[in-house]
Image: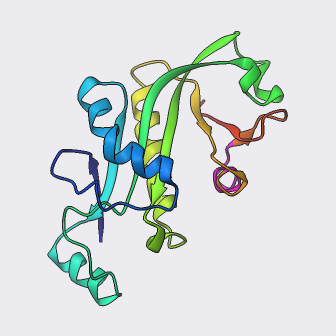
Amino acid sequence: MTRLEPLTGHHDRNRFDCGVEALDVWLKRTALQHQVKGISRTFVAVPSDETSLKRYRNAGFDDLDLTTILGFYALAAAFVLIEDLPPQLAKRYPRQIPVTRLGRLAIRSDMQGQGLGKLLLADATNRARGAAASVGSAGIFVDAKDESAARFYMNFGFEPNIDQPFKLYLPMW
């Protein structure tokens, strides 16, 4: 019903609204530029085909077409200091470690709470693990926007920094 693919110029970024202006603006103005420059990689969820589009429309999502972004996430290579990690994990690493940063993850506001975030996070984790098999990355790091987002990530095994609970880490190895 949903296909995950790299962001391209043919996706309709302008109609995306997740309810968080900073995320909406980043997708509309910055994501594709970063994609082209190799700064980050953004992956979008879109209706997979005409049949799934018809199912979405039957469920009341009349404004969708095959270029409509239902949700997205962005990944980038990064380094973090061990001070940004949970103390129980930090002691096993050198002072600075390579990670995959989950920079953004958002779902259209009218589709939140239906499992799409879980699908996007699973895909992001799989892509990060695949890349880490070829290029060093100790885990996935995310700066949650708020307490609700932090709880979402913790439900999937991310561990918060005690002093900075919106900084979360998921070790890969």
Q: Residue at x 64, y 44 (%)?
A: 144
Vertical placement of 133 versus 156: above or below? above
- Res. 30 image quadrant: top left
Vertical placement of 57 versus 79: above or below? below
Quarter that holds the C terminus = top right
- Res. 13 image quadrant: bottom left
Vertical placement of 82 versus 89: above or below? above
The picture places residue 48, in percent across and down from the top left corner, at 23, 66
92 to the left or right of 38: right
The picture places residue 76, in percent across and down from the top left corner, at 43, 29
80 to the left or right of 95: left
Vertical placement of 130 versus 157: above or below? above
Indicate the colouring scheme: rainbow
Say if the magenta span includes residue 49.
no
Q: Which of 98 and 37 is in front in this view?
A: 37
Q: Residue at x 37, y 30 (%)?
A: 40
Query: Does residue 109 appear anywhere in the picture?
Result: yes
Quarter that holds the N terminus = bottom left
Query: Does residue 172 appear anywhere in the picture?
Result: no
Q: Nearer the viewer, residue 164 or 20?
A: 20
Q: Which residue is drawn at 43% across and 65% down?
A: 108
Which residues make up the magenta segment? 150-158
Q: How many labels does the image show?
A: 0
The picture places residue 71, in percent across and down from the top left corner, at 39, 58
The picture places residue 31, in percent across and down from the top left corner, at 33, 39
Q: Residue at x 67, y 47 (%)?
A: 157
Residue, far top: 95
2 to the left or right of 159: left
- Res. 128 image quadrant: top left
